[in-house]
Image (cartoon, grey):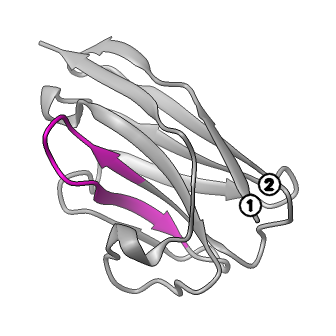
Amino acid sequence: QVQLVESGGGLVQAGHSLRLSCAASGRAVSSWALGWFRQAPGQERVFVAAISWNGNTDYADSVKGRFTISRDNAKNTVELQMNSLKPGDTAVYYCAADNGYRGGYLPDASEFSSWGQGTQVAVST
């Protein structure tokens, strides 16, 4: 079992940046896919970005060019650099891990088996 803990959320103005981090424990996740999803109030949890075990990345169209996902296998962490934030990015952001997802398409949340508790990101105008 993998435990995931997110950090780095907060309140920022539109156009500014935030960096989210997620630390995994319980086992090494170097061979697992790591991802970020987000859920706005009253909406479903949706895919944001993922990075496969070999470093391939996938992004939702809404964040492509603004967000960057990266991983550090030595530290068992994954990060999400979010630039040019918009009010529409406001949501709870969840870190996720899975040892089956191989990348190359935009996954549904149901495809990831391990989840963090989430961190709030709020973007004001």
**Residue type, mark 2 in image:** Asn
Q: Position of residue 35 (x, y in %)?
A: 50, 61
Q: Position of residue 100 (x, y in %)?
A: 58, 87
Task: From the image, state whether disc 1 or disc 2 is nearer to you.
Answer: 1
Q: Which residues are magenta?
A: 37-51
Compare residues 88 and 108 and report the one nearer the observer. Answer: 108
- Res 6 quadrant in image: top right
Q: Could you tell me which quadrant the C terminus lies in? A: top left
Q: Is residue 82 left or right of residue 2?
A: left
Which residue lies at the image location 85% right of the left edge and 57% below the top edge? 26
Compared to residue 53, the image places residue 82 above or below, namely above
Q: Disc 1 or 2, which lies upstream in sequence?
A: 1
Q: Is residue 5 left or right of residue 89?
A: right
Which residue lies at the image location 48% right of the left edge and 37% below the top edge? 118
Q: What is the distance, in whole Å, between disc 1 and disc 2 at their CAs? A: 11 Å
Q: Which residue is mark 2?
A: 76
Compare residues 64 and 46 and report the one nearer the observer. Answer: 46
- Res 87 quadrant in image: top left
Q: Is residue 35 left or right of residue 15?
A: right
Q: Position of residue 39 (x, y in %)?
A: 27, 44
Residue 32 numbered tag: none
Q: Which residue is mark 1?
A: 2
Compare residues 32 and 110 and report the one nearer the observer. Answer: 110
Which residue lies at the image location 61% right of the left edge and 38% below the top edge? 21
Label 1 environment density (alpha carbons within 10 Å; few <14, some 14–19, many ≥20): some
Q: Position of residue 45 (x, y in %)?
A: 28, 54
**Residue type, mark 1 in image:** Val
Compared to residue 14, the image places residue 94 above or below, namely below
